[in-house]
Image (cartoon, helix red, strand yellow):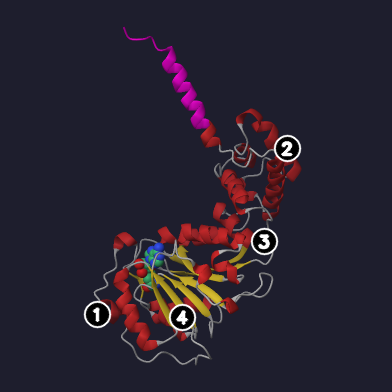
Amino acid sequence: MAASGKVASFRLPPLPTIGEIIKLYNLRAERQLSQNFLLDLRLTDKIIRQAGNLKNACVCEVGPGPGGLTRSILNAGAADLLVVEKDKRFIPGLEQLLSEAAPGRVRIVHGDILTYRMDQSFPAHTAKKWEDEPPDLHIIGNLPFSVSTPLIITWLEQMANRSGPFVFGRTRLTLTFQKEVAERLTASTGSRQRSRLSVMAQYLSTVKNCFTIPGRAFVPKPDVDVGVVHFTPLAQPQIQQPFKLVQKLVRNVFQFRGKHCHRGLEMLFPEAKRLELAEELLRSADVDPTLRPVQLSMAHFRALADAYGRLCRENHELIGYDFREELRQKHQRQRRSSKSKEPHPH
Ligand code: SAM
């Protein structure tokens, strides 16, 4: 139920503070669920500013909890806010806060963002063509770290396939991560933090590590600091190969981070043809086999993905090949043959 018409940009009327809501509804943070709340409105406003102009925008907030960030999103003028919260204890507090503060502008969903179908959650007129400017639709969230990392992988895959929240076009994301993960997401070629996540995020989007929030700003305080990261999907991804193929290539490269890159790339191929095909891959991509994984630029990954794509088209078994599976079968055969050689008990 999107609110129609313009939304005035005045701040919300005086409401119970988030601290009062927490007390009123007895919303103790569940440490096991990594619930760390942001209660300082200046800080939540600062996070929301990273998303860009939210005046009259559609927003999906993931994990609103007691509603601190939610309040800042509404103060910024969002016209249609969908919040998805897994923990049902928060729902009555959110209903009270939002029915008083922003009637008709908010939909509350009690659900799990990992399975929630966002492709059906906003009106069709919100959508923009992929090549156009991003739509006026934002995803914002301060989620537990155990959720935000698998979730960003899922969203990157959906970004590549233009599904989920990306059926509406280049939907922008503003999310929090453990500081080290935020650094990995934005790490450039050659930096210590360069990793699988850096390549996967940056081939599909412009990623900005906006600022760091010290752990002490959260209640209760987590053991780590937190980075706010903003993603804008690229109109032209830097690698034009299927997501799963790129993911497999990048995972293989980084599994031996400290070694020359040919070491991880070799594992893309069955043992019998490993060296020969890895050499062909590197030659055809024109990549120096002695570069370390962190030294590979996006252009190197693009050339490797294109060359690996060609090899997979020539040999259909390659894409499904998994060296761990080959190794497992080899060990099984060895166990069977050594058992058959054992003397039979009388
Ligand atoms: N956004 C609030 C804030 O900044 O104070 C709460 C942050 S707390 C770190 C994370 C919130 O995400 C909690 O309310 C938790 O219940 C919710 N959450 C955790 N996993 C979730 C999931 N899979 N789907 C939706 N919400 C989830």
Q: Secondary structure at mark 2?
A: helix
Quarter of the C terminus within the rendering? top left
Residue at the disc numbered 1:
24
Kindly identify the amino acid type of the residue bearing the numbered disc 1.
Leu
Q: Earlier in the sequence, mark 3 or mark 2?
A: 3
Q: CA distance from mark 3 to mark 1?
A: 48 Å
Quadrant housing residue 71: bottom left
Q: CA distance from mark 4 to mark 2?
A: 52 Å
Residue drawn 46% across and 92% down?
10
Quadrant housing residue 63: bottom left
Q: Relative to 27, is 31 above or below?
A: above
Q: Which residues are magenta?
A: 327-346
Residue drawn 56% across and 61% down?
158
Q: Earlier in the sequence, mark 3 or mark 4?
A: 4
Q: CA distance from mark 3 to mark 4?
A: 29 Å
Q: Earlier in the sequence, mark 1 or mark 4?
A: 1
Residue drawn 38% across and 92% down?
13
Q: Secondary structure at mark 3?
A: loop
In the image, 54 versus 122, the foreground residue is 122
Kindly identify the amino acid type of the residue bearing the numbered disc 3.
Pro
Disc number at residue 280?
A: 2
Asked if residue 58 lies left or right of residue 66, the reply is right
Horizontal and vertical percent for residue 44?
43, 78
